[in-house]
């Protein structure tokens, strides 16, 4: 059916295809005249399956998005896919998240990117690439005249050596819209104070709309560095993810409060798992009380050890500033009792009454 069918998007995510199924599928899609999107994520595909698909994709002249996330592709499969990427003039989105490319696979992919002029989105989280692999990827992207708009290098054990080349890339490629650096040990001390260097590279980045730094040990000082950047120097930033970044309830929470007060572009702010406690929630509520940002849609304060005092402070902030109330306030897995829940429920009713019918939902 596939060779003659007018199919543009084929999604077979999580179907246990394995190498055998991938090899059969490869025969069906080779040279397919209509296929533009292929999603084979989480299918147990290894090097043999990836190699068969790569050979098929060399004959495809229309594919724009390829998703092979969550498989078991190692260096040999990565090298085969690199050959297909190098020869493609249509592929724009390449998703290889959570595979096993390693340094060798990253080097092969970097060589392919130097030859490729179409890839704009690169998803490489969780591939154990290390500094050498990340450096090669960054150098390849810098060598290209074309733009890169999405880059995910999360969970790749990047240290100062790799971060140096990443920062050079960020200085050069000002078209980047999304940067994901989840779990890379970027902090406010050691390795050249990585967060300060990263912030310097992103300063006045006019296109960046999403920044993911979850599970990096920013600490209070690093948090302040990022919030200072986000307040005035990233004019299009709408999503900031700082979950599990060791913010705590003092200076880090105070910096976040200032961000809520002064930033006018954020729509999503993720602060889960930062041990904010009541003190941090009270500080954040001060920013919410006077915030002029009416765009905030999602504020996630889950897993922060917030109790009733913090909940009541947040409730008072919602009542005082219904226009600035987030549409979704997430307080999952805190220590809020019925008392705090009632206070927040009453605040939601007042936001609706005073905010012209604005709906705010609180999640406990």
Image (tube, rainbow, N blue to C red):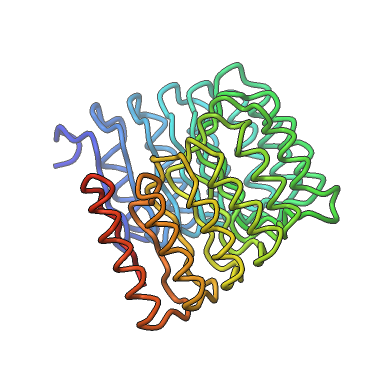
Classify 90 as above or below 329: above
Instruction: Using the rendered view, name the quadrant where residue 279 is placed.
Output: bottom right
Instruction: Using the rendered view, name the quadrant where residue 253 is placed.
Output: bottom right
- Residue 31 in sight here: yes
Give 262 or 247, whichever is nearer the viewer: 262
The percent coordinates of residue 354 (x first, y second) are 27, 50
In the picture provided, is 28 more to the left or to the right than 82?
left
**Residue found at x 42% / y 43%:** 267
**Residue found at x 52% / y 57%:** 98
In the picture provided, is 299 more to the left or to the right than 361?
right
The percent coordinates of residue 43 (x first, y second) are 37, 60
Give 283 or 87, whichever is nearer the viewer: 283
Give 64 or 271, whichever is nearer the viewer: 271
Instruction: Using the rendered view, name the quadrant where residue 232 is placed.
Output: top right
Classify 291 as above or below 218: above
Q: Residue furthest top?
A: 145
């Amino acid at each position: 059916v596939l060779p003659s069918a007018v199919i543009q998007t084929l999604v077979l995510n999580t179907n246990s295809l394995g190498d055998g199924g991938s090899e059969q599928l490869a025969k069906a899609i080779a040279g397919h005249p209509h296929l533009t999107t292929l999603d084979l994520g989480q299918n147990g595909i290894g090097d043999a399956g990836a190699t068969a698909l790569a050979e098929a994709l060399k004959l495809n002249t229309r594919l724009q998005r390829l998703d092979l996330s969550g498989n078991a592709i190692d260096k040999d499969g990565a090298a085969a896919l690199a050959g297909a990427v190098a020869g493609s003039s249509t592929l724009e989105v390449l998703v290889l998240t959570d595979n096993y490319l390693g340094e060798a696979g990253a080097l092969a992919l970097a060589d392919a990117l130097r030859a490729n002029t179409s890839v704009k989105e690169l998803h490489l989280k969780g591939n154990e690439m290390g500094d050498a692999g990340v450096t090669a990827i960054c150098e390849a992207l810098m060598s290209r005249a074309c733009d890169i708009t999405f880059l995910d290098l999360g969970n790749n054990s990047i240290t100062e050596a790799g971060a140096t080349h990443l920062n050079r890339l960020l200085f050069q490629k000002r078209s980047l819209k999304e940067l994901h650096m989840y779990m890379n040990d970027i902090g406010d001390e050691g390795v050249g104070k990585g967060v300060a260097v990263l912030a310097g590279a992103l300063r006045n980045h006019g296109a960046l709309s999403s920044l993911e730094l979850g599970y990096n040990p920013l600490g209070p000082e690093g948090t302040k560095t990022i919030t200072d950047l986000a307040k005035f120097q990233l004019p299009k930033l709408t999503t900031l993810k700082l979950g599990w970044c060791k913010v705590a309830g003092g200076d880090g929470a105070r910096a976040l409060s200032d961000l809520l007060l002064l930033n006018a572009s954020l729509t999503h702010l993720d602060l889960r798992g930062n041990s904010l406690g009541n003190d941090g929630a009270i500080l954040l509520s001060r920013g919410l009380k006077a915030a002029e940002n009416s765009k905030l849609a999602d504020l996630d304060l889950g897993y922060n050890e917030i109790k009733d005092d913090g909940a009541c402070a947040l409730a008072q902030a919602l009542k005082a500033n219904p226009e600035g109330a987030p549409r979704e306030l997430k307080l999952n897995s805190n220590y809020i009792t019925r008392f705090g829940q009632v206070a927040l429920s009453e605040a939601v009713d007042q936001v609706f009454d005073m905010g012209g019918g604005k709906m705010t939902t609180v999640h406990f």
